[in-house]
Image (cartoon, rainbow, N blue to C red):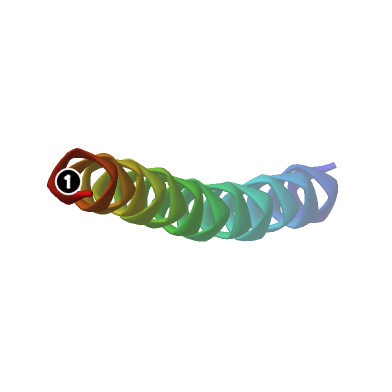
Amino acid sequence: MAWLALRIGTLLFSVGLWVAALWQVLIRMVQLCSICDACSQDAANDR
């Protein structure tokens, strides 16, 4: 029974790490998109 709990704990831990990594990437992409939107608005205002 203990090894089963250990396996489940390890699985949840690795899934948590993956989710955290994907979340970081998603936040980075959103930040980049907002920066790009700001840049395109600046370019539109210059014209």
Q: Position of residue 8 (x, y in %)?
A: 77, 46
Query: Residue at position x 47%, y 59% from top?
Result: 25
Residue 10 horizontal side relative to residue 30, left or right: right
Q: Position of residue 15 (x, y in %)?
A: 68, 52
The residue that label 1 is drawn on is: 42
Disc count in the image?
A: 1
Q: Quadrant of residue 12?
A: top right
Q: Position of residue 28 (x, y in %)?
A: 36, 56
Is 3 or 33 nearer to us in this picture? 33
Residue 4 horizontal side relative to residue 16, left or right: right
User: Which image quadrant: the N terminus?
Assistant: top right
Query: Residue at position x 78%, y 56% from top?
Result: 7
Q: Dot 1: what SS? A: helix
Is 20 or 7 nearer to us in this picture? 20
Q: Quadrant of residue 37?
A: top left
Badge 1 density bin: few <14, some 14–19, many ≥20, Cα 10 Å:
few
Q: Position of residue 11 (x, y in %)?
A: 74, 54
Which amino acid lies under the numbered mark 1 shown in the image of this protein? Answer: Asp
Query: Residue at position x 23%, y 53% from top?
Result: 43
Judge whether 36 appears above or below 5 on screen: below
Is 9 or 16 nearer to us in this picture? 16
Residue 22 horizontal side relative to residue 32, left or right: right
Q: Give the farthest residue toward the front.
A: 47
